[in-house]
Image (spheres, helix red, strand yellow):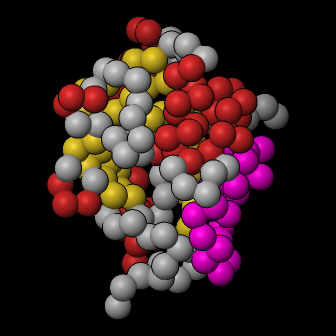
Amino acid sequence: MILQKPFLTFVTRRHPHRPKSQELNYQALRILTDDDWEQVFIDDPVGLGVYEANCMLLKRKDRVNGQYVYIYDDDNIVTCPTLITDLKEIVAQHDSDVIIVKMVWMGGTILPRDQFWGKFPQQGEIDSLNFVVRGEVWKKHIGAFAQPRCGDYHFIREIFNCNYNVYWHDCVVAAVLRVGNGQPDVA
């Protein structure tokens, strides 16, 4: 029996001492109107820190099965119910390798900000919640994410330097609840 690949894999790095964040993260996926997705968890058993969390994406890349991949950490939530449907329409029309979307950073700032929209990614103006990447492209370049800091920026910069087909989808699709940095939930 051949199982069909899900359209989108949500890769969720999670910390064992963030049950509240994880529950919000998981429940947010229930708003999606299309169920053609999977969520793959990468566990950090003790809070190893940002560098190890970034390296775990590379170490666990073979667990990712989706046609497209979205890094969706345990302190993030999806806010757009039609995310999967919208992405499928973009892929059908543009055959995109990378889809750049908007997200809400803590405090309400939308990234990328308007002056950076449609331009080469800038450090501090792009987050892993800002891009959905074709599975093969994600696996080929995920090693660039393995940085002590700003792995998301290094990853997307490498992809942009390779001139893949990028589509800019002007829609806020997710939000950061808080920056976990390997710390437990606040009581």
At a point 40% along the width and 53% down the height, the residue shown is 29
The reply to whether the magenta stretch includes residue 15 is no
Where, by quadrant of the figure, is residue 97 drawn? top right
Res 122 seen here: yes
Lateral position of residue 167 relative to residue 9, left or right: left
Q: Position of residue 4 (x, y in %)?
A: 68, 31
Q: Is residue 36 among the parts visible in the rendering?
A: no
The residue lying toward the viewer, choosing from 88 and 146, is: 146
- Image location (x, y in percent) of residue 174: 32, 48
**Viewer-side residue, 2 vs 71:** 71
Q: Is residue 4 left or right of residue 185?
A: right
The spot of residue 154 in percent (x, y) is 56, 39
Pick out the residue farthest to the top: 93
> Foreground residue, 120 or 102?
120
Q: Is residue 105 above or below residue 126?
A: below
**Residue ID at (67%, 63%):** 52
Query: Which segment is the magenta one?
Result: 39-65
| For residue 127, above or below residue 178 | above
In the rendered view, tell whether residue 183 sits above or below residue 94: below
Q: Residue at position x 40%, y 18% from top?
A: 167
Residue 107 x %, y %: 19, 60
Q: In the picture shown, does residue 178 fall above or below 40?
A: below
